[in-house]
Amino acid sequence: MQTGTATISNKAVDRLQAGHLWIYRSDMVSCDSSPGAIVSLVDEKKRFWGKAFFSSSSLISLRLLTREDRSIDQGFWASRIEQAMRLRQQVVSGTEVYRLVNGEGDGLPSIIVDRYGDLLCLQTLSQGADALKSLLVEVLVELFQPGCIFERNDTRIRELEGLTLLSGALYGKAAQEIICRENGLRFCFQPESGQKTGGFLDQRENRLEAQKVGRGRALDCFSYHGAFALHLARSCESVEAVDISETAIQQARRNAALNAINNIQFEAENAFDRLRLLDNLKRRFDTIILDPPAFAKNKSHITSALRGYKEINLRALRLLNPGGFLITATCSQHVEEAMFLNILAEAAADAGRKVQILQKRTQAQDHPFLLSMPETLYLKCIFLRVID
């Protein structure tokens, strides 16, 4: 790994001292190293502040690895991954699928590792992380002896780093699909073609909690492969699951069959259109799930995103019976919790419904976030109950 030195501004120093791990291009005075190097951070008085990944393309020029003046070798990475592993041993249970390394949240900026049974999915999302790919594979093989390590480096975040989009096996041979258990249910995952690294693992704990409160007739919008729907099927009389993708619905039907679940009706349709139709038909439900994709990919989309969230939540609230539950989420990092709660309050007022908040939840515990980095907290999941 190449090394060098980056000089940072006083503003960047303040940011590091506050516990943030990112330094933006505007706060980097100079850097004498090549793209992807691990560099020492110094201020303009040559005082040392840590070591970081350097990126020549991204607006995030530096990602802090440590505040210590120490060697960043294979032992460093093995130690960090072992720390992440120990946390999962404490907080993960009842599942064969979970996030093993959650980037900045585990002190491993821009490095993601998800576990699907015997298969590990790796993402290296910065120039520095990508330069370490072979070393990371060695460490993961030594620590976990997986059957396969598969890279899902086809996310567009890499384009901001000037990196090629890639997908394929880095170690061993990957099956096109793998069947694993989550919360006692069997799901078929496609590591090569599924969303994210094959599934939406961050909602795992929220799905189990939804199962606990779910009852009666249920509606699951933006269902994808049916994970929420299958959980609700175990506590609800019936479930209607809607997703715009016919391919996703076919996979959801297969997942239901894997578990011998037959009280779910799957439909390939735009969820906005289905909610409008159900509202016009005056249909009523006892439990509704809204788990849409991120409506705000960046700050410029916030206004339109809030309109979208208000529409789907307003219609869902109109569809609920008194005493019914709405479990509604946003995975948009740029939509803060206060914004989301305000939109829900507006939606409830416009729907003429009085609601209680039962729980405010976030991403599963295998997706830890940093108190000092709001960017690492992205998922907001609110459990509401209609009381009139």
Image (cartoon, helix red, strand yellow):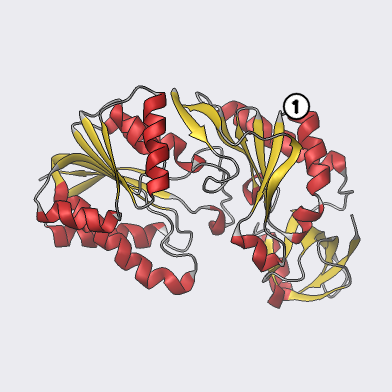
Q: Residue at x 78, y 43 (%)?
A: 136
Residue 1 appears in view: yes
Q: Position of residue 24 (x, y in %)?
A: 68, 71
Q: Residue at x 76, y 66 (%)?
A: 55
Q: Position of residue 68 (x, y in %)?
A: 82, 51
Residue 43's place in the image compared with 271, above or below, is below
Q: Quadrant of the C terminus?
A: top left
Q: Position of residue 23 (x, y in %)?
A: 70, 67
Residue 218's place in the image compared with 258, above or below, is below
Residue 258's place in the image compared with 326, above or below, is above
Q: Residue at x 24, y 58 (%)?
A: 273
**Residue 18 located left or right of residue 284:** right
Q: Which residue is mark 1?
A: 145
Disc 1, SS = loop
Residue 371's place in the image compared with 34, above or below, is above
**Residue 148 located left or right of residue 309:** right
Q: Residue at x 22, y 46 (%)?
A: 356
Badge 1: how crowded within 10 Å, few (<14), some, or many (20+)?
A: some
Q: Quadrant of the N terminus?
A: bottom right
Front residue (pair 20, 277): 277
Residue 226 appears in view: no
Q: Position of residue 233 (x, y in %)?
A: 29, 29
